[in-house]
Image (cartoon, grey):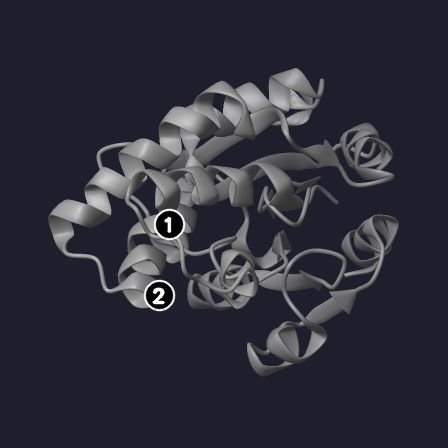
Amino acid sequence: MKKYILFDLDGTLTDSGEGIKNAIRYALNQMNVLDYKEDILNSFIGPPLSDSFKTHFNFSDIDTQRAIDTYRVYYSDKGKFENRPYDAIEELLEKLKKNGHDILLATSKPEVFAIEILKHFDLYSYFDYIAGASLDGSLIYKDDIIKHCLDNYTIDIENSFMVGDRFYDIEGGLKWGLKTIGVTYGFGSREELINAKANFIVDRPMEIYDIVEEN
């Protein structure tokens, strides 16, 4: 039976922490924000940048947009490739495709960057549809991005999964009736995934394949 698997990108397919955090450091330096705890940077991975800059640094709307624009200067040039696919990700995607399943991307990363990253790591050809955030801020939240994906690609909800490492992925998937698979090897914790009520939790990428085939 054909299954439909929606994947998050950062923390699920690729370990993107280095590039994201370097881009945040660059943006904060340009904004003359020099006094902050390094562990705050990890919390930027997953949610929209606008929410993180406002929450952690109390930026105004104008300063938030300036910080995002500055972040993107670094990220578009260097940060997006300070990144690597997790071990066995390509093997996972290849096996899912060979079994006739459709693979989709639902990421809060701007779609243009997501496509460049997938192409850079030779993963783009595995995907049947890609949905990402818009650069103009009109589409940034994970549940909206998942809905955008579902609105633009025909799937069988009862045989579909959302795979991600943060509660945004799990809550977004559950909101639209998808089975959810939380991964612990990314940037979220097992406790976070349990609290979000993930249907399944895995520690390694190839466990995703087993869940998809068995459910």
Q: Quick one: 81 or 141, which is closer to the camera?
A: 81
Location of residue 73 by image quarter? top left
Instruction: Kindly identify which numbered label has been placed on residue 56.
Output: 2
With 187 as the anchor, is 156 left or right in this view? Answer: left
Q: Mark 2: few, some, or many residues within 10 Å (few <14, many ≥20)?
A: few
Q: Quick one: 90 or 67, which is closer to the camera?
A: 67
Q: Position of residue 214 (x, y in %)?
A: 83, 59
Q: Position of residue 63 (x, y in %)?
A: 18, 47
Q: Indicate whether 36 appears above or below 75.
A: below
Q: Quick one: 133 or 174, which is closer to the camera?
A: 133
Question: SS for tag 2?
Answer: helix
Residue at 41 percent of width and 53 percent of height: 142
Residue at 65 percent of width and 49 percent of height: 11
Residue at 24 percent of width and 64 percent of height: 58
Q: Which residue is mark 1?
A: 147
Location of residue 93 by image quarter? top right
Residue 30 shows in this picture: yes
> Looking at the image, is mark 2 or mark 1 nearer the viewer?
2
Tags 2 and 1 touching, CB below 8 Å: no
- Tell me which label, 2 or 1, sits earlier in the chain: 2
Work out which quarter of the rendered image holds the N terminus and state it.
top right
How far apart, in angstroms, are the residues tagged by discs 2 and 1? 28 Å
With 173 as the anchor, is 140 left or right in this view? Answer: left
